[in-house]
Amino acid sequence: MKIIITESQYRTLLESTDNESMDKNKKLINSIVGFDFSGRIEQITSTHDIANWIDECVGWESIRRRLNNFGPMYTFELDGVKYLYQDRGKFELFMDDDCNDYFNDEIHERLGIDLLGLKFSDIINMYFEEEEN
């Protein structure tokens, strides 16, 4: 399947605010990626939120420094592999549950979002919903 995105559609993907446009954007992303990210992204804001596999790869102190320097991290699963994600500003860092690091394009290409010029932070903004206390 080939999908052509025009510049105006690309802007709409990034700038949507109403629910109808957001639903259309999610349907487009879902068809490109092959699954729905809704409910599949978890946020890490403190060392208390980290899963054991992350601690084995990075360690608590390093996680604390990364959170303080770059903001929240997120976890998601793709094709049975768990990933840790953090937007570092100039680049996006991904780490899988085998402690392998990926920078920018490898995961974007696997997801197909590189074709749209999207960053994974755009996916986070579209799909991640913070839990209300």
Image (spheres, rainbow, N blue to C red):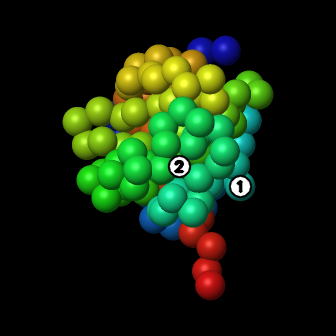
Other residues around mark 1 within 10 Å, as few (<14) / some (14–19) / many (≥20): few
Q: In the displayed structure, would residue 132 be above or below residue 55? A: below
In the rendered view of the protein, which quadrant contains the N terminus?
top right
Picture residue at 57% right of the left edge, 69% below the top? 130
- On the image, the x and y values in percent for residue 108 come to 48, 25
Tag 1 residue: 39
Q: Give the secondary structure at mark 1.
A: loop
Q: Is residue 90 left or right of residue 36?
A: left
Of labels 2 and 1, the one closer to you: 2
* Amino acid at circle 2: Tyr
Tag 2 residue: 74
Please say whether residue 69 is visible from this viewpoint. Answer: yes
In the rendered view of the protein, which quadrant contains the C terminus?
bottom right
- On the image, the x and y values in percent for residue 116 come to 44, 28
Residue 121 versus residue 43: which sits nearer the camera? 43
- On the image, the x and y values in percent for residue 5 come to 46, 29
Residue 93 versus residue 100: which sits nearer the camera? 100
Q: Quadrant of residue 88?
A: top left
Picture residue at 40% right of the left edge, 33% below the top? 93
Other residues around mark 2 within 10 Å, as few (<14) / some (14–19) / many (≥20): many
Instruction: Farthest residue to the bottom: give it.
Output: 133
Please say whether residue 32 is visible from this viewpoint. Answer: no
